[in-house]
Image: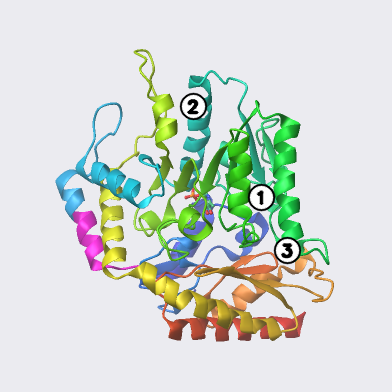
Amino acid sequence: MTSNYGQKLWEMDRQHHLHPWTHWDSFKKDGALVLDRGNGSYLYDCDNKKYFDAVGGLWCTNIGLGREEMAEAIADQVRKMAYASAFTDITNGPAAELATKVAQLAPGSLNHVMFTTGGSTAIDSAFRLIQYYQNCRGKHQKKQIISRVASYHGSTYAAMSIAGKKADRVPEFDYIQGLIHHISAPNYYRAEPGLSEADFLAQLVKELEDKILEVGPDNVAAFFAEPVMGAGGVIVPPKGYHKATMEICRRHDVLYVSDEVVTAFGRLGHWFASKDVFDLQPDIITSAKGISSGYLPLGAMIYSDEIHEVISAENPDRVYTSGYTYSAHPVCCAAALKNIEIMEREDILGHVREVGPYFESQLKTLLDLPVVGDVRGTMFMLCVEMVADKETKKLFPDSLNVGKQVANACDDMGLIVRPLVHLNVLSPPLIMTKEEVDFVVSTLRKGIEQVTKGL
Ligand SMILES: Cc1ncc(COP(=O)(O)O)c(C=O)c1O
C-alpha cells in the first residue's frame, strides 16, 4: 500500500476495526489489504492494482460487482421507502414479491420465507423455528441437534455451536453444551485407506442412524447439513449421501435443514442445489449470499407447508416472537429481486452449468504438481488441497500455513484465492468466463510452484 490515501485507511483500520476471524499476531503487523472498488469479477486496491476475485467476495458476488441496474434498483427503493418494519402486521412490496419468488424457486412444499440479515441469522432462525415447532407439537423433549464435523453454519452463538469446524472452536469462546452432536464429515479423500466409496457411504449413513438411536429418536429434532461443505474444505459427499441421510431423518421424525447459504442462487448451476443437484427434499433451507449477490445483506429461512400448518394452527394466544429490525428490509429485498431478474435474463445458471465442468477439469490439471493432493468440489465451488506427501496424504505443519503462502503469491500476480490452512478455495463470481478460468488456473499453478520451491 503506497498511496497516502491507502496508507491512511490501512492505519485507521488497523487501529479501530475488529475484523471477523482476526489473527491478532499477523494483523498487528500486517493490517488488512484495503480494497477500493470493484467491477464484474475484478477488485482494485487503493493503488489501482487489479485482482481477479476468485473468492467471489466470500462466496457471494454471484452476478459480479458494479452493475448499474442494481445501483438503480437500490437507489429507487431508497428514494421510495428506505425502511419499513416487517413486525406483526406491516409489510412492503419488495418483501411480499421476494417471498413469493423464493417460494416459487424453492423445492417442494417450501413455501414460507422468513427474511434475515444473513446466513448466520438464517441458521439461528431455523434453530429457533425447530424448537417452536416441536413445542407446538407437544414434543418438548425433541430438541437435540445433529450436525457434522468440519461443517460451517455461521457465527451467532447457536450457528457456531451447530458448526463443527475444529479450527473455529477456539478455547477463548464458549459454545452451547449438551445439545448438539457432531458426526463425521463425508470427506472421501480423508476416509480410511482402501475403503470403497460405497462402503464409506454406508458407514456415514449408519453413523447418522446410530447417533439418532443413541440420543433417542424422541430427543432428536433436526439434522443440519450443507449440501456441499464450504468453509470446512469444499467437501462433496459420496453419491447418494443426501437421499440416504434424508431417508434416515424421515424414518425417525427428524427435520432436515439444508444449509444452502453458499450453494443456493446459482453456485452449482441451480437456484437451489438440494433437490435439483442432490435429489434431497429438505424441511428447511437456509440461504443468503447469492440471494442479493452481496450487494446488500440479506438471508432467507425457507420452510415447509407441513411445519407451517403446525406452528400456525388456530390458537388465539400464540405469537411467533422471532425476527429482526432489518427482517425483510425493503431495499435489500428490492436488490434481491433485481439480482434474480438479472440471473434469469442472462441465464447465469446455464452459464455455470456450461463453464463449471471446464473449471473443474482445468483445476484438476494441477494434480500433476507434487504438493497437490486433491482437487475437489463441483461447478463454481472448488478447492485445492496441498499435502507434504501424496502417498500418505500427510499434511504440511499448520505453522507453515501453506494455503496463505500460496494466496500471498497469487495476490502478487493479481489473483485472490482464499487460504484455509492447507487449502485454497475458489468460489468465483458466476459470470467467470473460460478465458478467466485459464488465468485462474495458470496463476494458481505459478503460485503453488513458487511456494513449493521455498518449502
Ligand atoms: C454454509 C454457511 N452457512 C452459514 C454461513 C453464515 O453466513 P453469514 O456469514 O452471512 O452470516 C456461511 C458463511 O459463509 C456458510 O458458508
Marks 1/2: CA–CA distance: 30 Å
> Which amino acid is tagged 1?
Asp
Any part of residue 44 in sight? no
**Disc 2: residue Cβ within 8 A of ligand 1's nearest atom:** no
Residue at 44% x, 79% y is 49
* 83 or 145, nearer to the observer: 145
Q: Position of residue 52 (x, y in %)?
A: 46, 77
Q: Secondary structure at mark 2?
A: helix
Q: Circle 1 sits on which residue?
A: 168
- Magenta segment: 65-75
Marks 1/3: CA–CA distance: 28 Å
Q: Position of residue 77 (x, y in %)?
A: 19, 50
Q: Circle 2 sits on which residue?
A: 133
Q: Which quadrant of the figure contains the C terminus? A: bottom right
Marks 2/3: CA–CA distance: 36 Å
Q: Circle 3 sits on which residue?
A: 197
Q: How is the image coloured?
A: rainbow
> Which amino acid is tagged 2?
Tyr
